[in-house]
Amino acid sequence: MNKALQAMIDNMPEKTGRSLEEWKKVLKDHSFEKHSEAVTFLKEEHGVTHGFANTIVTLSNEQAPNEVDLIAYQYKGREGLYPIYEALIGFVTGLGDDVTVTPKKTSVSIIRKHQFLLIKPATKTRIDLGFKLKDIPVTDRLEESGPFGTMCTHRVRVSDLKDIDTELKQWIQQAYEMSV
């Protein structure tokens, strides 16, 4: 389990009023057909933020693959990209204790109050970062969102650790700050 997820679990009682185990019991008393229904229930009925609600539901579903499995799946056959992923996660989790890292089957959502960054291994040699940077002009490097569609406003292609430079970190920081 990565540090960000563990920190989120550790902070859950303070931030949501209940521990993960207590939330699992709450969810067990209800039956939901879809993941999103359980997330909506926690948000609307218990005032839990989206990031915590999504994490609680994911960790409560015993059939759901765990975070390590999801990340391993994404980087299977793309192992050379994993150090880039680790460096990105290290940077984004250092932005603040309100950052939530949510692995999915093909990508990892980085959320503050809203998703501000999406990390997706796009090819065997490249990770695409999807950004939410409203009203920021595109450049040669900070492209239009491309395959991310309306989910993101911009995309940056990362193929090497050296691509995680000051400019990229500034864009990530900016997206983080805009996601309040």
Image (spheres, rainbow, N blue to C red):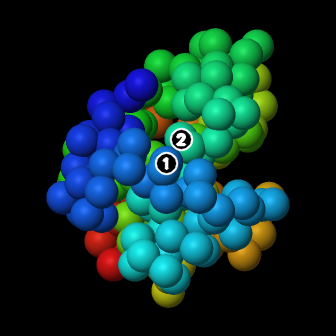
Q: Is residue 31 above or below residue 49?
A: above
Quadrant where the N terminus is found in the figure: top left
Counting from the top left corner in percent of width and height, residue 104 is at: 66, 43
Above or below, comparing residue 3 to residue 8 in the picture: above
Circles 2 and 1, Cβ within 8 Å, touching? The answer is: yes
Closer-to-camera residue (28/18)? 28
Residue at image point 60% right, 74% down:
40
Q: Which residue is mark 1?
A: 24
Q: Quadrant of residue 64?
A: top right
Residue 98 shown left or right of residue 100 in the figure: left
| Residue 72 seen from this side | yes
| Residue 21 occupies quadrant | top left
Q: What amino acid does circle 2 point to?
A: Leu
Label disc, if present, on residue 59 of the rendered structure: 2
Dot 1 surroundings within 10 Å: few (below 14), some, or many (20 or more)? some
Q: Residue at x 64, y 42 (%)?
A: 61
Above/below status of 83 relative to 96: above
Residue at the image position 74 percent from the left and 62 percent from the top: 32
